[in-house]
Image: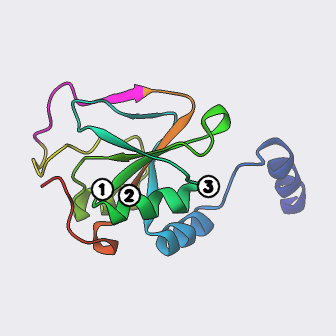
Amino acid sequence: NAMFIQKLLVKFCPDSMSPAIRRAKDNMRQYILVHEEGFPSDECGFWEIFTGVANKDECASKSREKGLPAFAFGEQDAQGECMGEHVYVTQAYFDKYKHDQSDPTPACGKNQGDECDKKCEWLDNPYFNTYAINPSSMGEQVSK
């Protein structure tokens, strides 16, 4: 019975991944997916385009180098496009969504706690996913 379920899962949900494997990969990379098919609006903080990026790991690396704790990475027709997000990610924000990846509110542009601009929201875009970088894995953040 378990083997049948496994075969069905692989056939009909090829992108599915066990939560344990996902957590292990997140711990190794030190960034997590916080929003699929979209990125934060300009009211959350402006963004910076990085060129010549081959994958999410390189996008995360470029964002870390610039002190940007979040990034949006392109998929499908936007494959390889990378935008570093000028937001502020607290350790509490990161830890909360590391353990419960239900749809979070976007991070704010400054260390404002829970007081984000009311217009700070997710913008739908089927070609970009947004990731938050573990603040403990990087130096000082540009937006404070």
Cα distance between the residues tagged 3 and 1: 18 Å
Q: Crowding near pointer 2: few (<14 within 10 Å), some, many (20+)?
A: many
Q: Crowding near pointer 3: few (<14 within 10 Å), some, many (20+)?
A: few
Kindly check if marks 1 and 2 are in contact, taking CB atoms under 8 A apart as contact.
Answer: yes
Residue 105 visible in the picture? no
Cα distance between the residues tagged 2 and 3: 14 Å
As for residue 117 lying within the magenta part, the answer is: yes
Cα distance between the residues tagged 1 and 2: 5 Å
Earlier-in-chain disc, 3 versus 1: 3
Relative image position of residue 19 (x, y in whole percent):
58, 62
| Residue tagged 1 | 68
Which residue is depicted at the point 39% across and 26% down? 123
Q: Which mark is residue 63?
A: 2
Relative image position of residue 45 (x, y in whole percent):
23, 38
Relative image position of residue 61 (x, y in whole percent):
44, 64
As for residue 43 lying within the magenta part, the answer is: no
Hey, what amino acid is under mark 3?
Ala
Camera-side residue of 9 and 87: 87
Earlier-in-chain disc, 2 versus 3: 3
Hey, what amino acid is under mark 1?
Leu
Q: How is the image coloured?
A: rainbow
Hey, what amino acid is under mark 2?
Ser
**Mark whose residue sits in front, 3 or 1:** 3
Which residue is depicted at the point 25% across and 55% down? 89
| Residue tagged 3 | 54
Residue 102 visible in the picture? yes
- Please give the range of residues in magenta: 115-123
Q: Secondary structure at mark 2?
A: helix
Q: Which mark is residue 133?
A: none
